[in-house]
């Protein structure tokens, strides 16, 4: 099987890898690049646990072949905190107890950041619709939404 | 063994598809194809990714209408203000496909060529009289959107063919479209019934042209000419709505499944058609 050479920028770092064509971006992120923050929940684009951005656009990394990443910039959950400084969304998730098992959390954070990057003043309804593709089976969504709206307010004030 | 090619011209893509020895599939956003690949439902030898072909993603004006690249993601379609103004029904239908994440990839060509009877963008595209530019070994042809899907999972495209762009015509004054679907929840579901309606009104609010298309109630989207006839020549009064409802119900040949019985889907088709027509008339009247 022929391997493809892929050049990307991941969390600001130029990154190259070789991959077989059937592998998803999620497979390569987790198994080859050891960025295991993105989670595999459903493998069918329903749960959002594998959310990343590609050139700033929110996508499921399980619904994208790794070879398709060639020439594009990827942001994952690992790129969100600056060293030990958590992103305001990450802090607000902790403050509001917006996670229990945490499996959906990286995807929710990446998706919420993509929302606030394009809409600093989302309504609760807008936030709920935006995050409809991120499933959580333990915490429920109210605390997540409160954390996102609180983070949005803090980011606007900053 | 799966092979992957990402040609940078139409000619190269057609040559690769025409020369494929096994099962080849065209890749746009991949939100359906990758699920089929991973689940083992699609056994593929070759994936031809079209996204490196110039112009296959993006929206431009042409002859008073719009050209939408076949692989343009739903999110990009939703962000095009001019398109939303001219074709609100097409845009709302495209934006109903999946989650925010899916919108980041999912395309009109993929939604159409996946050939699901419940595809949301398809009734709206057909109601809009959208045409598709198809390329293949025999060159280029332009065909109506309704000629592509011939049955669940089946299209009229040859193995060497794919769609490169969609054309939406220019709009006369007081024209508008709308798409509505019924699902048992508010987001992230597959249409039980979908209805796309496009109308043109005269200065007195009388309908001079109409297209009514239903999704998820037959093996393919259904153009309901009788429903359009019920609208044309009248304002949207009770007679027009009753005729539309009846024609829509008559056009249904739905399946019976856990999401809707035949009787239920048929009844809801009439309701969705009426509601979509009401929205389209309101929008057209405001122009």
Image: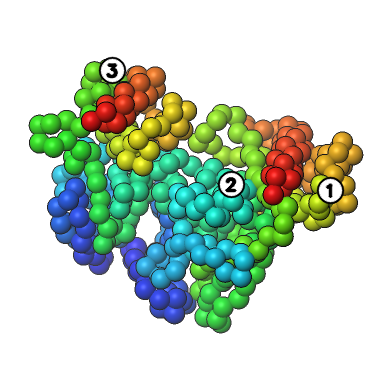
Q: Position of residue A90 (x, y in %)?
A: 23, 28
Extreme left residue here? A84
Residue at 32% in and 40% down: A117
Q: Is residue B206 left or right of residue B102?
A: right
Residue at 51% in and 65% down: B60
Residue B119 seen by the camera? no
Q: Position of residue B207 (x, y in %)?
A: 82, 50
Secondary structure under the numbered disc 1 in the rendered image: loop
Q: Which mark is in front, 1 or 2?
A: 1
Q: Is residue A27 left or right of residue B73?
A: left
Q: Position of residue A38 (x, y in %)?
A: 25, 39
**Is disc 2 on the same chain as disc 1?**
yes
Depicted B22 relative to depicted A99: above or below: below
Residue beneath disc 1: B204
Secondary structure under the numbered disc 2 in the rendered image: helix
Mark 2 Cα shell of 10 Å, populated few (<14), some (14-19), many (≥20): many
The disc placed on residue A96 is 3
Residue B93 seen by the camera? yes
Q: Nearer the viewer, residue A14 or B172?
A: B172
Quarter of the figure with the C terminus of chain A: top left
The disc placed on residue B93 is 2
Mark 3 Cα shell of 10 Å, populated few (<14), some (14-19), many (≥20): some
**Is disc 3 on the same chain as disc 2?**
no
Residue B190's image quarter?
top right
The disc placed on residue A107 is none
């Amino acid at each position: 099987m022929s391997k493809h050479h892929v050049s990307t920028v991941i969390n600001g770092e130029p990154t190259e890898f070789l991959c077989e064509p059937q592998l998803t971006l999620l497979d390569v992120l987790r198994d080859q690049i050891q960025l295991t923050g993105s989670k595999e929940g459903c493998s069918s684009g329903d749960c959002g646990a594998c959310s990343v951005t590609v050139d700033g656009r929110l996508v499921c990394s399980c619904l994208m072949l790794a070879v398709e990443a060639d020439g594009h910039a990827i942001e994952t959950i690992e790129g969100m905190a600056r060293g030990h400084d958590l992103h305001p969304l990450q802090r607000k998730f902790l403050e509001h107890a917006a996670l229990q098992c945490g499996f959906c959390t990286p995807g929710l954070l990446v998706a919420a950041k993509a929302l606030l990057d394009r809409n600093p003043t989302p309504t609760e309804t807008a936030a709920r619709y935006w995050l409809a593709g991120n499933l959580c089976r333990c915490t429920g969504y109210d605390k997540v939404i409160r954390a996102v709206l609180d983070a949005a307010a803090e980011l606007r004030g900053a | 063994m799966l092979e992957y090619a990402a040609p940078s011209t139409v000619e190269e893509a057609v040559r690769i598809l025409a020369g494929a020895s096994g099962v080849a599939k065209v890749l746009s956003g991949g939100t359906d194809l990758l699920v089929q690949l991973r689940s083992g439902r699609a056994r593929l030898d070759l994936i031809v990714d079209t996204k490196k072909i110039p112009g296959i993603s993006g929206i431009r004006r042409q002859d008073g209408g719009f050209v939408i690249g076949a692989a343009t993601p739903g999110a990009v379609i939703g962000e095009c203000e001019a398109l939303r103004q001219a074709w609100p029904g097409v845009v709302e239908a495209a934006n109903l496909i999946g989650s925010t994440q899916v919108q980041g990839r999912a395309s009109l060509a993929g939604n159409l060529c996946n050939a699901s009877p419940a595809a949301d963008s398809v009734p709206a595209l057909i109601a809009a009289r959208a045409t598709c530019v198809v390329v293949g070994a025999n060159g280029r042809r332009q065909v109506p959107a309704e000629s592509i899907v011939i049955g669940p999972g089946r299209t009229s495209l040859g193995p060497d063919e794919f769609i490169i762009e969609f054309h939406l015509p220019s709009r006369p004054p007081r024209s508008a479209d709308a798409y509505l679907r019924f699902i048992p929840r508010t987001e992230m579901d597959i249409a039980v019934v979908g209805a796309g309606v496009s109308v043109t009104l005269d200065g007195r609010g009388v309908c001079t042209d109409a297209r009514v298309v239903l999704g998820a109630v037959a093996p393919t989207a259904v153009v309901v000419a009788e429903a359009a006839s019920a609208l044309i020549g009248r304002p949207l009064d009770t007679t027009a709505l009753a005729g539309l409802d009846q024609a829509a119900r008559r056009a249904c040949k739905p399946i019976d499944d856990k999401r809707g019985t035949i009787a239920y889907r048929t009844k809801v088709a009439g309701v969705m058609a009426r509601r979509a027509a009401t929205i389209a008339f309101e929008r057209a009247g405001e122009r």
